[in-house]
Amino acid sequence: MASEMGARRRRLRAAFGDRSQTLVEFLVLSGLVIGSLGLFVGPWMPPAAPWGFAMPLVFVAGFFLLEVRRQRAVAQGADAAAIASSYDWAVFLFSLACAVAGAAAFFIAWSARPAPPADPNTWQPPQSAVSVDLRP
């Protein structure tokens, strides 16, 4: 499996180029990290998007399931070189989807900032002090 991971990186590097492949890997890893560890920035963030903590586990589980599926297809007699391209793109798109989901968890949690608490020292008139009944 490790040799296939290395071969997949080489094939994607050939398809995207050195710098683009590095940028894609950085975006995938940063999306996963910010979606899980970034939720500790504020105390209100973990309850707002708790599924962000599961994104690294979903990424690893999905990656292994795709690899098991590829190995099963090769074991059934499919040409490894012929199916490599389709599985490369499946893993690539799954990785990007996990990264986007992680970044979305951070964004949702960050934008769910609670309203500041009301200051108890601020005076407000009693409700009966102002008449609100309007009559024609």
Image (tube, rainbow, N blue to C red):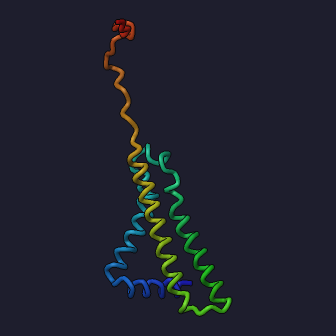
Image height check: is 136 above or below 55? above
Occupied quadrant, residue 116:
top left
| Position of 43 relative to 127 (above/below) | below
> Which residue occupies 66% across, 89% down?
75
Q: Is residue 120 left or right of residue 84?
A: left
Q: Residue at x 58, y 76 (%)?
A: 66
**Residue sitting nearer the eye, 63 or 89:** 89
Q: Is residue 120 positioned above or below 94 on the image?
A: above
Q: Which sits in the foreground, 45 or 99?
A: 99
Q: Quadrant of residue 11?
A: bottom left
Q: How many marks?
A: 0
Residue at image point 54% right, 91% down: 82
Q: Nearer the viewer, residue 41 or 124?
A: 124
Figure quadrant of the N terminus: bottom right
Residue 70: horizontal and vertical position, in percent? 60, 83
x then y, percent, for residue 14: 38, 88
From the viewer's side, name the closer residue of 136 and 97: 136
Against 121, is 71 above or below? below
Rendered image quadrant of residue 58:
bottom right
Q: Quadrant of the C terminus?
A: top left
Q: Residue 32, percent across and down? A: 45, 64
- Please provide percent x and percent y for residue 5: 50, 83
| Residue furthest to the right | 76
